[in-house]
Image: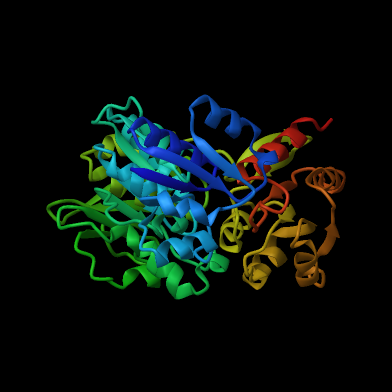
Amino acid sequence: MNILIIGASRSGKAVSMLAKKLGHQVFVSEIENESKFTETIAFFEKNAIDFEFGKNSIQLLKKSDIIITSPGVPREAEIICEAEKRNIPVISEIEFAYQNCKNPIIAVTGTNGKTTTTALISHILNNSEKNSIVAGNIGVPFSQVLENIDETTIIVLEVSSYQLDRIQNFRPKAAVITNITPDHLKYHKTMEDYVETKWKISLNQIGNDLLILNYDDLLLRKNRLAKSKIEYFAIDSQAGDAFVRDGKIILINKQQKEEELMLVNQLSLPGKHNIYNSLAALLAARAFEVTNENIRSALSKFEGVNHRLELVRTIKSIKFINDSKATNVNSTWYALNSYDNNIIWIAGGRGDNNNYSDLDDSVLRNVKQIIAIGEEAEAISNHFCLMKDCIIADTLEEAVFEAYSLAAENDVVLFSPSCKSFDMFLNFEQRGDVFKEIVNNLK
């Protein structure tokens, strides 16, 4: 089969190799200039994978049986539209990987919390004598982990709306939707489309599969006629199969009786958002017959994930926190409400119809200084300048230096951008790594 892959970043690179090993004829087309892809080009040449950079040539469609898109390739891209006119199937990387996977799958999506929830589920499983591995939007493409993997290993996938947009048969044994708030609207155009795409995670599930939903999220409380079994988790409502009451996590067992799992303050991760993440994770793990004892032990020992409220360093009682994973306003809301100390907030990047007014109360209560960077610097400064002192910095390095000079004992320097990274960095991981390098070099 002749496969055309659109996009040469991590997912495109990984799926090209999987398709090649399966015996298909592969061509990778990347519209960005080749200057950003030196290592990838060397990889393609080493593995005899044909490619082009700086364009998506329409003539490639003449000999293409199927197209695999990398996450975020616009629906209106000329080559995608032309392929659809010619009735050439267009699928996502996770769909192609799923079609060549025999492992049990737990899939996690949502606007916020999906990375931590994915990592938590895998942590619980691995600490319960079950083999699991994380993949997908969390950093390692689904296609990449399929080589030399035992069929009993449980794959825990973080999946974005971009990845769900082009599925056909993708069917996880257990699926989680953590929450839904506005995001990626430049791609989806409308909130309705974004919501519908998130719900696709359950599209192909059947009666003995499990869908785990946040009961406190009104967009998720409504039953979308899912065919699978549904379990709910909640904090604000004492409803569902896992909820909080009087500072305790309560589970409903198979006999429909309540069980006290643990105290909320025994969770290793702070913040209300991490209670939600823990509730979702424990329900997913329980579906794979993990005991309450193992769940309790794992939740009390989990150390978190890179780039999400990650303590980088403490200097003179000043904490430097890397929250580069906060690519939208809602994610930053959780960050701003996770610390009681005075916050010096570094924010900015590429906006996505950001509504900063959602952060007003948190900023008034917890922030003493704002340093804005990137394409959204002026928008952030203009919005908050009447509430708080705002500074615009040209670079992330300048922002960190400025924050350090302004910080006093027991302050928190919080890098929680609220924006995408693509104006200055390749992705949020690179952005977070640069922040950590700058902080670790401070004297």
In the rendered image, the vertical position of residue 417 relative to residue 11, given as above or below: below
Residue at image x 27%, y 27%?
Answer: 150
Q: Residue 216: x, y in percent?
A: 39, 67
In the rendered image, the vertical position of residue 193 relative to residue 290, given as above or below: below
Q: Look at the image and tell me in which quarter the N terminus lies.
A: top left
Q: Residue 432: x, y in percent?
A: 66, 41
Q: Residue 35: x, y in percent?
A: 70, 39
The quarter holding residue 227 reads bottom left
Q: Look at the image and tell me in which quarter the C terminus lies.
A: top right
Instruction: Report if residue 72 is visible in the image.
Output: no
Q: 407 or 143, which is in the foreground?
A: 143
**Apparent side of residue 92 relative to residue 423 in the rendered image (left or right):** left
In the rendered image, the vertical position of residue 11 relative to residue 45, given as above or below: below
Residue at image x 79%, y 30%?
Answer: 441
Instruction: Report if residue 132 is visible in the image.
Output: yes
Residue at image x 36%, y 41%?
Answer: 156
The quarter holding residue 241 reads bottom left
Q: 83 or 327, which is in the foreground?
A: 83
Q: 122 or 42, which is in the foreground?
A: 42
Residue at image x 41%, y 60%?
Answer: 165
